[in-house]
Image (cartoon, rainbow, N blue to C red):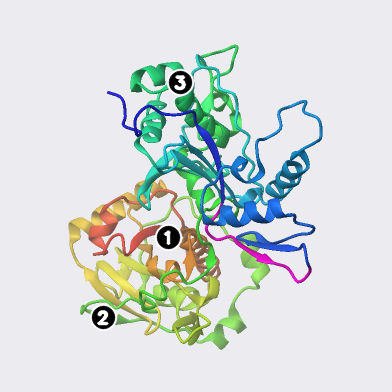
Amino acid sequence: MPIDVGGTAPAPTQLWSLREDVLVEDGPEQGHLVVVTKWGEFGIDGAGDVVRASLRRMCLGPISLENVVGKRPAPGDQPAGNWREWAELWRVLDLLSGSVVRSLGIGDGDRPLLSAIPIARSASLMLPDVEPDLPVRLSRFAAIRPHEGALLVESPLAQYHVLLHRQLAVHVTTALSSPMSVREVAARLGEPLAVVAGVVAYLAGTGIALLAEPDQETAFTEDSDPVLLRWSHHDLLFHARSRMGRHGGQTGAVFPLADRLPSPELVKTVRDGKRFALYRPNIADLVANDPPLTDVLENSKLCDELSDRQVTAAQVGELLFRAARIRSVASGSTGTDVRYDISDRPYLSIYGLYELELYVSAHKCTGVPRGTYHYDPRLHELTLVNDSEPELDELLDGARVAARTSSQPPVLLTLTARVARTSWMYGGIGYALALTHVGALQQTLCLVANAMGLAACAPAVDPGDITNSALRLDWPAEVGIGEFLVG
């Protein structure tokens, strides 16, 4: 059944606009424009009336450039008429390419079919001529999600997000989940070939869709690329979304939630449970008796096989005191009257947010009964959160298998993240920072354990969903993010 796009569709039209975060201002000198973008300020000298009018109208929404400049000269035309105006406008649009939104309309007065929104400073869109019978397919890295009343298509390989504003664009895009030519898609949807070809050209130009190799019509370059074959869809998308270069939204310390939500608490409040105060070593004694840092670094290693010998509560206390305790608390500011608590601890955490929590699952630990405990880094205490023997055994067995050891570890440390601690401050990279902090904490635990003569192991595989129930986590407010075994 044909999709309703407002009757018989006219020929598709290329439309141009600027990202919503772009500001066009007059400069201090006549003929000078300042364009403020996500990527910085751009000065444009000698901006003529056509450039000024085009940029100001592009700030208001998608326009046809020909409505401002006049009909575009055809290739081979003599340099007369509006040729110079077009050349000057192309120069400016090329300079601002990382902020120029390209849309496809069909001239019916309704919304564009789709818009290609640049998310990289160097983004540049070249629309290919798509042969009607050449197979086309979505990239295996493409993902579709709702966004502000439309569907957004993204790929870590693309320098653009594509917003599908209307159902025709949605249906053309989803039809390309398997290889299909423009002619086949148009026939299936009952829509004009030129309109479907226009949608496909935008998808292919942005890298969301792939064109088959002309001499191998069932082959797509992506499927044999040795670099891309080594990346999973999820890993590459996560990488791209956690770096500024290919991120469409706010990134960095922008406090995206400070005006709506309070700063999450510095340390997780644990419900009542049996508490154990831990041993606190004397720092002066450690400084006097510890091996030199170079010795620890050069001889530090992760143990392949943990013995089932017991560790002591004092050893656990010393390990956590030296690696994870709160040494001091201070106050930070968003730059307004909104303030938040930060702390200082032995391992690295950007801006002192410390979103990680530590849980101790004790199996063979003298002075600590079997069970799973939450570690309070401020009071340096353990609080029992779960004394279920079956759930403890499942946790320990999962850790044993992941670490490839023959027996359950005497002590399992589980690292969790309250991601709200970082996402409240950072736009788009909160979870990526949490992963960085996990590595920092695991490294610190490893060095301290080796200095103490303990065996340490950081398994690469987690115990699975049992982590959520055994630790009584409020998922996804708090998520398991790493493990560390001590023996």
Mark 1 surroundings: few (<14), some (14-19) or many (≥20) residues within 10 A? many
Which is more N-terminal, label 1 or label 3?
Answer: 3
Three-letter amino acid code of the residue under disc 2: Arg
Q: In terms of depth relative to the viewer, which is nearer, 316 or 413?
A: 413
Q: Is 28 colored magenta in this rendering? A: yes
For mark 3, what is the residue?
193
Q: Measured from the top left, where is residue 37 in percent x and y?
A: 62, 60
Q: Verify whether residue 326 appears in magenta.
A: no
Residue span colored magenta: 18-29
* Residue at disc 2, secondary structure: strand
Mark linked to residue 484: 1
**Rendered position, 12 above or below 20:** above
* Cα distance in 3D space between marks 3 and 1: 59 Å
Q: Position of residue 478 (x, y in %)?
A: 33, 64
- Residue 275 is labelled as 2
- Residue type at mark 1: give it: Phe
Sequence-earlier tag: 1 or 2? 2
Q: Position of residue 80 (x, y in %)?
A: 80, 36
Q: How crowded is mark 2: few (under 14 residues within 10 Å), some or many (20 or more)?
A: some
Asked if the residues shown at circle 3 and circle 1 are in contact, with their CB atoms under 8 angstroms apart, the answer is no
Q: Residue furthest right?
A: 79
Instruction: Determine the residue positioned at 37% across, 46% down.
Output: 150
Q: Earlier in the sequence, mark 2 or mark 3?
A: 3
Q: Three-letter amino acid code at disc 3?
A: Leu
Instruction: Determine whether, in the image, residue 212 is placed left or right of residue 98.
Output: left
Against 486, residue 207 (above or below) is above
